[in-house]
Image (spheres, rainbow, N blue to C red):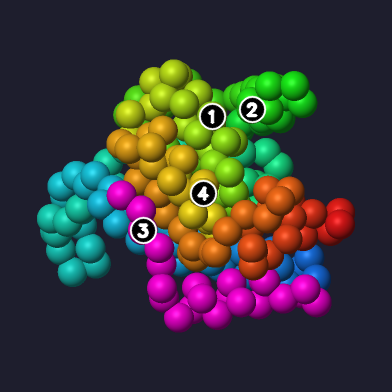
Amino acid sequence: MVTIFDHPLITHKLALMRMEETGHKDFRENLDEIASLMAYEVLRDLPMKEVHITTPMGPCTTKMMDGEVILVPILRAGMGLVNGIMDLVPTAKIGFMGLYRDEETLEPVEYFAKFPKELSDGVVLVLDPMLATGGSSIAAVTKVKERGAKKIRMVSLVGAPEGVKAFTEAHPDVDLYLAALDDHLNEIGYIVPGLGDAGDRIYGTK
């Protein structure tokens, strides 16, 4: 399933991020806020358990989260989505996935991976702001599946139709969440209209 958020707050903040004149400080702040807003819906169906607690007025039966949330940002740009989600779920664990593209085969190659011990019981959110060709996202999800993850969701900010098609064909069992679906990829693989290189704009390295 592909979910594209049309909430006014998300659309407004993304418009600010798209602007060429937006500096890295404002870019990061808006990204944090969008990540929190998206996570609220992405995690809507988290498993719950019944608990018995005592309020100042007496005993109460209610519900609390049952299980872990594990964030797996694709380095480096995926780190830009972590803080906003952590603000909402401060108990979340974090894994890391580093990929580069082989110049000859053009296939993503893993150069770094570090995960919490157990992925099979948690809800794993793979994070990458841009879903362009879909290659990195497809590879990252494949690799967390290989490590035992069963409940996986892909969270991106902006997607291109080409990348969405490739991702959903490769992983039809993984829900994909986007803040916007843009028009197309250009000749060098950038999303149009997009917002430029997300990593450079997050970290001020452009």
CA distance for labels 1 and 4: 16 Å
Residue extent of the magenta highlight: 1-22
CA distance for labels 4 and 2: 17 Å
Name above or below for residue 75 compared with residue 89: above
Judge by depth and name the residue closer to the eye, 11 or 40. Answer: 11
Q: Is residue 87 visible?
A: no
* Sequence-first disc among 3 and 4: 3
- Local crowd at mark 1 within 10 Å, few (<14), some, or many (≥20)? some
* Sequence-first disc among 4 and 2: 2
* Label total for image: 4
CA distance for labels 1 and 2: 7 Å
Quarter of the C terminus within the rendering: bottom right
Question: What residue is at 44 percent from the left and 18 percent from the top?
Answer: 146
In contact (CB < 8 Å): disc 1 and disc 3: no
Question: What residue is at 59 percent from the left and 49 percent from the top?
Answer: 132
**Mark linked to residue 139:** 1
Q: Which residue is mark 4?
A: 162
Q: Which residue is mark 2?
A: 108
Under circle 4, the secondary element is helix
- Local crowd at mark 3 within 10 Å, few (<14), some, or many (≥20)? some
Question: What residue is at 27 percent from the left and 41 percent from the top?
Answer: 66
Name above or below for residue 48 compared with residue 181: above
Under circle 3, the secondary element is strand
Judge by depth and name the residue closer to the eye, 28 or 176. Answer: 176
